[in-house]
Amino acid sequence: MSATGTTGGVSMTEQAGAPAGGPLTGIRVIDLSAVVSGPFGTSILADQGADVITVEQAHAPDIVRDTGALVESAQGVSAMWASLNRNKRSIALNLKDQRGKDLVLELIRDADVVVQNFRPGAIERLGLGWDVLHALNPELVMCSVSGFGSDGPYSHRPAFDAIVQSITGYPMVQVDDQGEPQLMATIVADKVTSLNVAQAVCAALVARSMGHGGQHIEIAMVDASIHFLWLEAMWNHTYVDHETDSPDLSAVCKLFRTVDGWAMVYPLGTDAQWQGLCAALHRPDLASDARFAGLHGRITYGSEINQELELETVKYTTAALVKLMDDADVPAAPVNSREEMIADPHVQHRGIVQESVHPTAGTIRSARSPALFSKTTSVNSRHAPLFGEHTDEVLSDLLAVSADDLVTLRSDGVIA
């Protein structure tokens, strides 16, 4: 099965079984996770060349297959699934049947990594906990992802992005002008957790290469989300021995109206950039205002700066304002719509948004892997899989399961 697509004018050819060629080529990952908090992390590993085999439940496909934009002809490859699971293989097993469990254990015996995000305790009840897997494969790296961790008063709770955002304070950081808390308009808790999954797995693989053997990694969405939030959103809660009342960065950085839309003009750069901003807008009074001297002053009096800048930006079109700032070496940008982002000349030049042809979903867009390696170049070697698309391939090639046994296992509901 093959398909072709282009990204930034570069041809991509997809061939079944073709190595990705990325820095993780040769690493095999058994992905027992579902939805986003694990699979987005394993998608990074897959983009970088790992052979990621995602294990779906034989009678319950991953709910992401049915989430968001989905056309009937795509056969369970939703827009979200297509981006989240490219470069992976899908097998479908019934892990509650001992034969299904034995199959996944055999796959894990020779694997490098296992990622799972069952609720704490569930993987142990399945007989696939760390103690079992480590005894089977001492060199294995296992990453367990959960909403709240394996212990603590919330560890038993189901976790979804909006739940974790709420507990970790994101909506209060996003308070609107009327004082109402707002969720982040993207699944930030899921995605930042997955970034930590990919990084931690790679760190454990490095440790293994240095002779430390396999190990178990635990990543909780609440932990990852607070860590991600802390830097600037919690700066008034960092000094324990001193009280501070610095405005939130979100209260200082705002979008400005223009004649025909919106632009971002950034007043918190260097002193030279601030002076350039004031000169470009013909506001020498702002340049000489002692309150705004230095970055700390511009943060402290950010609200006052914004009021003054609002008076000026409405005199320009977005394009004219951005050019004016760019000529003065002042950080600025148009506020792109989603369609404008795709068409943005810099996005186009970088080949960030790529197109490929999926056998059931047709031509699809996705964002390429952001890491560009000078030697071990990553490519799209596989389309996002149909449900259980690679069950027979994986079990026959890796475990030598015969064609007759595959028929029996399928008729018994052990595989799909």
Image (cartoon, helix red, strand yellow):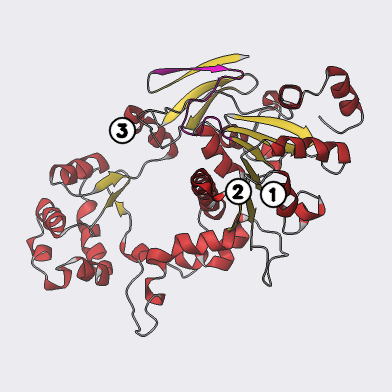
What secondary structure is found at the residue carrying circle 2?
Answer: loop
Query: Residue 347: horizontal and vertical position, in percent?
Result: 35, 33
Is residue 125 rendered to the left or right of residue 151?
right
**What residue does disc 1 label?**
134
Q: Residue at x 43, y 34 (%)?
A: 339
**What residue does disc 2 label?**
214
Image vertical order of residue 94 relative to residue 72, above or below: below
Report the number of discs: 3
In front: 284, or 144? 144
Query: Of label 3 and label 2, which has the lower sequence position?
Result: 2
Residue 288, picture quadrant: bottom left
Residue 94 shows up from this direction: no
**Closer to the eye: label 3 or 2:** 2
Query: Of label 3 and label 1, which has the lower sequence position?
Result: 1
Q: Residue at x 71, y 40 (%)?
A: 62
Query: Residue 315: horizontal and vertical position, in percent?
Result: 20, 49
Is residue 341 rendered to the left or right of residue 277?
right
**Amino acid identity at mark 2:** Gly
**What residue does disc 3 label?**
346
Q: Main secondary structure of the magenta part?
A: loop
Q: Residue at x 33, y 71 (%)?
A: 247
**Amino acid identity at mark 3:** His
Q: Which numbered dot is residue 360? A: none
Query: Residue 300: horizontal and vertical position, in percent?
Result: 26, 72
**Closer to the eye: label 3 or 1:** 1
Give the quarter of the figure containing the C terminus. Answer: top right
Residue range (magenta) = 10-27
Residue 227 shows up from this direction: yes
Q: CA distance from mark 3 to mark 1?
A: 47 Å
Query: Residue 106: horizontal and vertical position, in percent?
Result: 76, 36
Is residue 155 rendered to the left or right of residue 324?
right
